[in-house]
Amino acid sequence: MSNQSSTIMSNLSGNSCEVKLLIELQTSIFLHGSEILMLILSVIVFPLLFIMMEKCLRKSFFHVNIRIISVVLCLSLLAHCVGRIVQHTTDIYFWIATIPICDKRQYVQLCMVFRGMYLFGMYCSSFTSVTLVIERTIATYLSQKYENRKAKIGVMIVAAQILLSTAITVIFLRSANLPDRPDYCFFRTPSNDWAVSLDVLSLSLNAIALFQGFRLNNINIKLRSTVIVSHLSQKYQIEENKTLIRVILRFICIDFFFMVCYFLLTFISDFNQKSLSFSSTLAYFELIHCVPVYAIVMMIAMPKTIKKIQQENTQKLGDHVRVNDDAYLPYLKKQWLTR
C-alpha cells in the first residue's frame, strides 16, 4: 500500500502537481484563518465604501479636487476588496471541496485578474497622501489661478496616481512565473531588492507628504493671521485651505502609521522567512497587507475628525461674533450719550 502511494505521489509530481506543498497549504489552519478574517472584513467594508464614496461626492465642505482624490481612494479600496473577496472565496472553496488534491490548485487567469485588482488597490490607495499634499501645495502657492482651473488639476493628479499604480501592478504581473494551475496566487518580484526598493520608495514618499502636510498647516496659519486681504472670496479661500489641511493632516498621520507598520512587519517577515513554512509566510502576507482594516479605521476616524473641526470652527465663529457685539454695543451707547 505504501509503495502504491509513493508511486501515485511521484506520478503527480511528474505532472507538475506538488502534492506535499498542496497538502501543507490545504491543511494550514493559520493560512485559512487569515483568509477567512480578511474575507469577512472585505465583505463588511465593500458596501460601506459605496456609502463613503457617495458622501465624498456630496460633501460641499471639501474642495472639488479633494472630492475627486477621495473618490479615487474609495475606488482603489473597492478594487482591492473585490480582488480579496473573489480570491479568498475560491481558496476556501478549494479547501472545503471534496475533490482530488491536484484539482485544488488555482487558475492562472483568475490569479492575474483578481490579484491584479488586489495589488492595484493596495498601491493606488498608498499614494493618496502624496496626491492630497500635492493638490493642497498647489492650492496654497497658486491660490488665485488654482480656483479658475477647478477640477483640471485634480484630474491630472489622480491620473498620474492611477498610471503609477497600474505600472507597478503590471510589473508584478509580468514578473510572476506562474504555471497554468498555480498552488497559490502569490506574486513575486524578479528580486527581493526590487520589492524592498518599492517599499522604501512608498514609505519615503509618505514621509515627505507628512512633513509637507505639517509645513502647509503652519504656512496657512500664518497666512490667516498676517495677510491682509480686501476680497471676501480670498479670505474664505484662506480659511477653507487652513481647515482642509487640518483634515488632510489627520488622514496623512493615520496613513503613515499604517505604512510604518506594514514596512516593519514586512521586514520582520522577510527576515524570518527561512524559519517559517511556506503556508505561514503566505498567511503573514495576507495579514500584513491589511487594507480592509485600513479602510475601516479611516471610515471611523475621518468623519469624527471632520465633525470635530467643523464644531471648532463654529465655536470660533460664535466667539468672534460675541466679541464684536460686546465691542459694538458700548460704542453705540457712547454715541447715543454724546448726542
Image: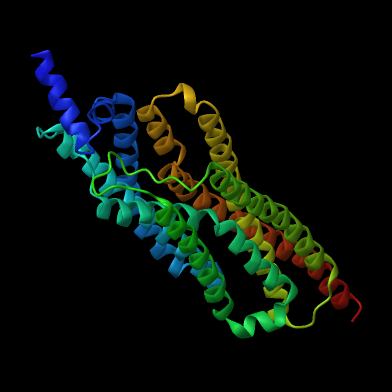
Which quadrant: the C terminus? Answer: bottom right
Question: Foreground: 96 or 128?
Answer: 96
Query: Outermost residue, bottom direction?
Result: 148
In the picture shown, does residue 167 fall above or below 337? above
The residue drawn where x is 78% and y is 58% is 218
Name the residue at 59% across, 55% down: 311
Image location of residue 289, percent across then percent down: 45, 42
Which residue reaches farthest right?
338
Question: Is residue 62 shown above or below 298?
Answer: below
Q: Is residue 250 visible?
A: no
Can residue 21 be seen here? The reply is yes
Going by the image, does 266 lie left or right of 51? right
Drawn side of residue 15 relative to residue 216, left or right: left
Whole-percent x, y for residue 245 in the image: 66, 60
Query: Would residue 8 be found to the left or right of residue 172 on screen?
Result: left
Horizontal and vertical percent position of residue 184 = 30, 40
Identified at 65% across, 66% down, the residue is: 134
Residue 207, given in percent of the width and then of the height, sits at 67, 50
